[in-house]
């Protein structure tokens, strides 16, 4: 998972570039980096850690150049650079290459070499992609990439002349924006309001776009099939203020919350959420049911986003640390708690429910913004290990099993068709494979 951002500006771009990338921090917290191109040079830096902790705004503010890109990542270090007969470029990438080992073998057989990797059995996806783009040039390289990889991607390339951006089959978002003096491309539009940018449009699945002083132009439209939008972006991943493929993330979550209130009504004293991504569902549920929306957990603002951490133990510890309950509100209440999803169920079973009951909650009813996850995500989100998923690990067969195992008084999940209604897309257009569909 990554957040990627690119800018072509009439002014020096470094400040907007660093801030723009920083607004995508929720998409990855392991690595961060940026690159800027000018007539005379291409400069870059990458770090392990969060952008605002690692990149000193005062130190970078004098970097010269009007074109740049940046990334935050939960996987590999970005950006990477390549030099070929087509010139030098920097690459940032959000996606997942299935069969990366075979692709590496194929590239070695074609005469490529990989240097500077301490573990030669593991070559990061973005390095493999960089080799294909260097071999064929940006546009033909992206065409070949789409033919050679299984998986999905959004990517941005920085050359001496401008930016090239491309989107695969649709699971990874990518959106264009502009201000009075700049054109940008970004994983999400949550970047735009505070930088004075307006949404131009989404990059279409299969589209390769050039961004230069004349604005945006389509270099090629690939006929990729089937197009599948990344449903989990609206459910959990994206910032609530973003608009993805024409759908407001916050409004999507409000609509699902309202649907849950109609389908799974229950007498309760309050509706609350697991912050942050449960908030939109709680508002929708409360507005529809008339039950007051009251906070019972306060989020510790400096916590990491749990899914971006490496091991299950790290994720559980961070999930517990980041929520601070308010016992005086919880005591004696029948509580509806909304959450975006249940993947492993560990946080609900071992943290949320016991803490609410220990604080005096009379009843805890969970309402979940998507169906129970049933499969790993092969595209770099949720989990890559099917055996960790609650449905698989505990051999769950129905909601009653989930309710009993998690210690809840009731549970209700949104259905696949609810995701289609809230997004305004057809079921066929939605990626639903992590729900086993
Ligand atoms: S399988 Fe699920 S998490 Fe993965 S891309 Fe599809 S919708 Fe998103």
Image: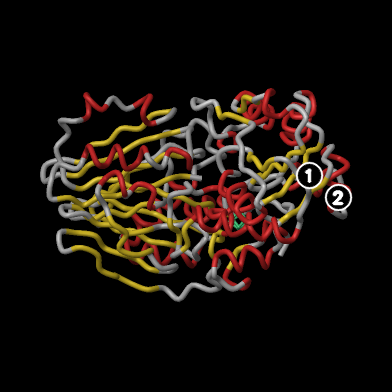
The mark that comes first in sequence, 2 or 1, is 1
Left or right of residue 323: residue 193: left
Circle 2 Cα neighbour tier, 10 Å, few/some/many (<14 / 14–19 / ≥20) = some
Can residue 106 be seen from the camera position used here?
yes
Residue 71 percent coordinates (x, y): 38, 42
Residue named by callout 2: 396
Q: State whether residue 99 appears in this view.
A: no
Q: Dot 2 lies on which element? A: loop
Q: In which quadrant is the C terminus drawn?
A: bottom right
Residue at image location 53% in from the left, 53% down from the top: 233
Residue sitting at x 24%, y 60%:
211
Q: Which is more toward the observer, 363 or 376?
A: 363
- Residue at point 64% right, 25% down? 326
Residue for point 30% across, 38% down: 19
| Cβ–Cβ under 8 Å for marks 2 and 1 | yes
Q: Which mark is residue 390?
A: 1
Q: Is 219 or 274 nearer to us in this picture?
A: 274
CB of residue at label 2: within 8 Å of ligand 1? no
């Amino acid at each position: 998972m990554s957040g990627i951002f690119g800018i072509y500006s009439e002014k020096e771009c470094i400040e907007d570039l660093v801030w723009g990338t920083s607004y995508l921090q929720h998409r990855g917290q392991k690595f961060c980096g940026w690159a800027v191109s000018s007539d005379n040079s291409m400069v870059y830096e990458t770090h392990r850690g969060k952008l605002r902790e690692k990149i000193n705004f005062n130190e970078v503010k004098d970097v010269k150049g009007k074109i740049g890109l940046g990334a935050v990542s939960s996987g590999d270090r970005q950006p990477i650079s390549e030099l070929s007969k087509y010139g030098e470029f920097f690459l940032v990438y959000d996606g997942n290459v299935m069969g990366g080992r075979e692709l590496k073998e194929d590239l070695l057989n074609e005469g490529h070499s990989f240097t500077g990797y301490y573990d030669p059995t593991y070559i990061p996806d973005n390095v493999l992609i960089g080799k294909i783009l260097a071999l064929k040039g940006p546009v033909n390289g992206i065409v070949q990439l789409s033919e050679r990889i299984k998986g999905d991607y959004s990517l941005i390339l920085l050359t001496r002349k401008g930016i090239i951006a491309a989107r695969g089959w649709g699971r990874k978002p990518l959106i264009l924006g502009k201000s009075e003096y700049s054109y940008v491309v970004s994983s999400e539009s949550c970047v735009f309001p505070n930088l004075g940018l307006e949404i131009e449009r989404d990059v279409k699945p299969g589209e390769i776009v050039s961004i230069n002083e004349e604005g945006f132009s389509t270099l090629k439209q690939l006929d990729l099939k089937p197009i599948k939008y990344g449903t989990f972006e609206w459910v959990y991943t994206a910032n609530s203020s973003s608009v993805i493929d024409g759908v407001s993330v916050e409004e999507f979550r409000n609509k699902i919350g309202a649907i849950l209130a109609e389908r799974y009504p229950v007498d309760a004293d309050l509706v609350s959420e697991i912050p942050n991504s449960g908030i939109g569902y709680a508002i929708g549920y409360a507005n529809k049911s008339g039950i007051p929306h009251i906070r019972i957990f306060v989020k510790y603002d400096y916590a990491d986003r749990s899914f971006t951490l490496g091991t299950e133990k790290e994720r559980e510890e961070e999930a517990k640390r980041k929520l601070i309950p308010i016992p005086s509100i919880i005591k004696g209440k029948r509580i509806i708690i909304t959450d975006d999803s249940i993947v492993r169920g560990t946080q609900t079973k071992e943290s949320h429910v016991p803490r609410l009951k220990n604080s005096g909650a009379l009843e805890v009813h969970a309402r979940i913004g998507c169906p129970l996850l049933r499969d790993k995500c092969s595209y770099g989100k949720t989990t890559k290990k099917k055996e960790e998923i609650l449905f698989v690990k505990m051999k769950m067969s129905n909601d009653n099993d989930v309710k009993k195992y998690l210690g809840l008084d009731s549970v209700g999940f949104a259905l696949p068709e609810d995701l289609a209604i809230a997004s305004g897309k057809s079921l066929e257009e939605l990626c639903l494979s992590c729900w086993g569909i």
